[in-house]
Image (spheres, grey):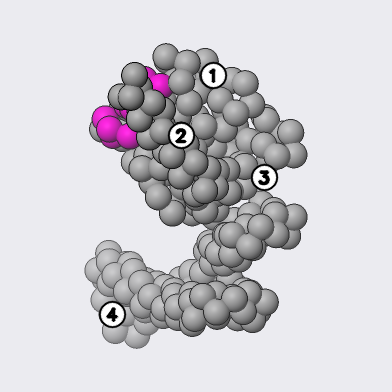
Amino acid sequence: MLNLVISLLVCTLVSVGLTIFAGVQVLYASIAAVVVFGVCYLLLTRYVMGKVAGLMDAVQGDIQAGRTEKAIKILESGYKYGNWQFYVKPQINSQIGTILYLKRDFSKAFDYLQKGFVRHWVAMGMLAICYMKRNKTTKMVETFEKACAASKKESLIWNLYAFCLEKVGERDKAISVMQKAVKKTGGDERIKVNLEALQEGRKMKMKAYGDLWFQFHLEKPGSIIKQQTKAVQGRRKIVRR
């Protein structure tokens, strides 16, 4: 990437210049060159990532207003920074894929999500769900494993992983995943509750995550309300008796 190349070039020039033209000892010249490399690379990285962050911020209004195509075009204009900095293109792909997934344009979203950034756990979760819906359970598991390894403290990705495993009939594997998640997340209460539910043969409860959960389109907010209404009605019937 250009950031690295430029930094290495500046580093080399500093080392050679200090050694040959300034008569500085090789050891000290090398130390100075390494420092210059670090500073140069850091500044270039901050500049490029600042540009990318600016694009991300610029599309928020378009996304909220439903101007999805415009938002995607703006984000795609950031591909040029991929030649400068590592992982820029995957991050942009993850963002675009997430936008399309939220719109329920799963086919187009899948194309971008496949080329996404592994540390964008939301996008990785969406990609895994796409594999699940395509009956590619092995790919689903592989994707979730990568996502959980990269974001091991994020409890929702573990819960999502177990939820999908249970959905494809792999309850035992789901329990195993949640047992591992308890350790990795430091005993997150939401994970403990769902682990207990799986062990007792009950359905997992994901409503504690609110909109973060509903963005994956695995459960509609309305279905939760209906379940709560039925539960209330059931309790009322019991009281009347």
Q: Which residue is mark 1?
A: 171
Sequence order check: which comes first, mark 3 or mark 2? 3
- The Cα–Cα distance between marks 1 and 4, rounded to whole angstroms, is 70 Å
Q: Residue 128 at what x, y percent from top left?
A: 61, 41
**Closer to viewer: mark 1 or mark 2:** 2
Sequence order check: which comes first, mark 3 or mark 1? 3
Q: What amino acid is labelled 3 in the image?
A: Cys
**Closer to viewer: mark 4 or mark 3:** 3
- The Cα–Cα distance between marks 2 and 4, rounded to whole angstroms, is 84 Å
Quarter-of-image position of residue 57? bottom left
For the C terminus, which image quadrant? top left
Vertical position of residue 96 compared to residue 64: above or below? above
**Closer to viewer: mark 2 or mark 4:** 2
**Closer to viewer: mark 3 or mark 2:** 2
Q: Which residue is mark 4?
A: 23
Q: Residue 174 at what x, y percent from top left?
A: 50, 23
- The Cα–Cα distance between marks 1 and 2, rounded to whole angstroms, is 26 Å
